[in-house]
Each structure stands twice: as C-alpha cells, then as structure tokens.
C-alpha cells in the first residue's frame, strides 16, 4: 500500500521516497516537518512492517531541541491512525533501550503496554543495555479514540518496571 502524506494542525509527515522491501518486510520512513516554521524536526518510520501479518514496528526520532514539545506524540498519533485505519493493521510494536527515558515516556503517554524485556538486547558505547518491548493493539487504539470522543482522559494503567536506568555489561 502506497504511503501518503499525513497532516495534523502542527505537523506534516512526508513519505521518504526510498521505499524498501526485503522479503515480506517493508520499511517506510516519513520526514516530520513543523508546519509553522517549515523546518524538519525529526523522522518517524514503520520498520519491518509485515502486510501479510498486519503488524509493524515503529520508531520515532525527534531533534533534541524539539523534544518534550508534543511533536513526537502528535507524529506518532498520525502514523497510528494511518496504520490502524487506512492499512487495517492489528498491532504496533516498539523496542526502546532502557536508558532512553524520553522515548519510554512518549510511548507510555500514548498508551503502549509492556510486553517484556529483552535482556542485553542493545549495544551502545561498548555497553549492553536491556530493550523494553512495548505494543499497541488495534482494539486498544480504537478504545483510546472512543474515550477521547466521550471526553474521558485515559489513564496509563501499565506499570513499567524500575529498569529504565539499569544496564548490563
């Protein structure tokens, strides 16, 4: 399915013209642009999307000076809408290094649930770190939309383990 430009009040997500398919997996990246200032503030992508299985992984990268301003969540919600509504996927998975507190906070705020820990699954600067495995299912996404439509604030019910700062060599 061809990627489309996605748009919200503040952001435009432009599909990167490099569309990569390896075996049954697809990688599709988008450039995140701040509409007001017409500046690139990051990228977001579907990584290892599997159309036959109706699932994908997602990665979000926001420039340091644009973090904690709501852009990551807004871009994520745009992509989620496309994934669950237009593409009819069943699930989105995320892998986040346990030291990446901003990313963990973003996905917690978006309602992603903990699936597990991949111990020592990431190497950075000659150290091994755990990967936090998160997911959002299609029905959870639509429940979140329904709560918003009804004016209810959704609570983050998932407790993340106190492993955010731990690392292993």
Image (cartoon, grey):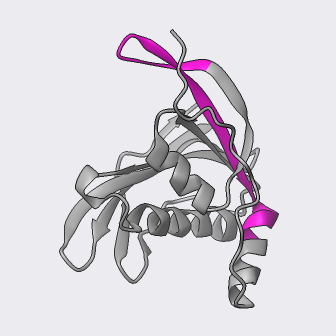
Instruction: Classify residue 162 by image quadrant.
Output: top right
Residue 128: within the magenta? yes
Residue 11 location, x and y as percent? 36, 73
Which residue is nearer to you in this view: 168 or 72? Answer: 168
Q: Which residue is drawn at 67% across and 44% down?
A: 134
Which residue is nearer to you in this view: 65 or 3? Answer: 65
Q: Which residue is drawn at 59% across and 61% down?
A: 109
Residue 116 location, x and y as percent? 74, 33
Q: Which residue is drawn at 60% across and 70% down?
A: 81
Left or right side of 23 for 2:
left
Q: Is residue 152 visible?
A: yes
Residue that sits furthest to the bottom in the current view: 150
Relative to 159, residue 78 above or below: below
Which residue is nearer to you in this view: 8 or 97? Answer: 97
Relative to 76, residue 94 above or below: above
Residue 32 location, x and y as percent? 34, 62
Left or right side of 168 for 66:
left
Quarter containing the N terminus: bottom right
Residue 2 location, x and y as percent? 51, 60
Q: How many labels, in total?
A: 0
Residue 152: within the magenta? no
Q: Which residue is drawn at 36% across and 53% down?
A: 43
The range drawn in magenta is: 120-142
Q: Is residue 59 visible?
A: no
Assign the magenta stretch its main secondary structure: strand
Left or right side of 5 for 147:
right
Relative to 88, residue 116 above or below: above
């Amino acid at each position: 399915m061809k990627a489309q430009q996605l748009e919200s009040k503040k952001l435009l997500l432009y599909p990167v013209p490099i569309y990569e398919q390896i075996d049954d997996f697809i990688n599709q990246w988008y450039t995140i642009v701040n509409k007001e200032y017409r500046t690139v503030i990051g990228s977001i992508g579907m990584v290892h999307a599997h159309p036959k299985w109706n699932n994908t992984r997602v990665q979000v990268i926001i420039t340091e000076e644009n973090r904690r301003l709501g852009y990551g969540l807004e871009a994520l919600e745009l992509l989620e809408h496309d994934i669950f509504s237009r593409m009819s996927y069943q699930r989105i998975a995320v892998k986040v290094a346990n030291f990446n507190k901003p990313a963990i906070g973003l996905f917690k705020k978006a309602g992603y649930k903990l699936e597990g820990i991949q111990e020592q699954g990431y190497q950075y600067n000659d150290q091994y770190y755990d990967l936090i495995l998160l997911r959002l299912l299609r029905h959870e996404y639509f429940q979140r939309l329904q709560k918003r439509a009804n004016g209810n604030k959704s609570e983050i019910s998932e407790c993340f383990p106190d492993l955010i700062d731990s690392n292993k060599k």
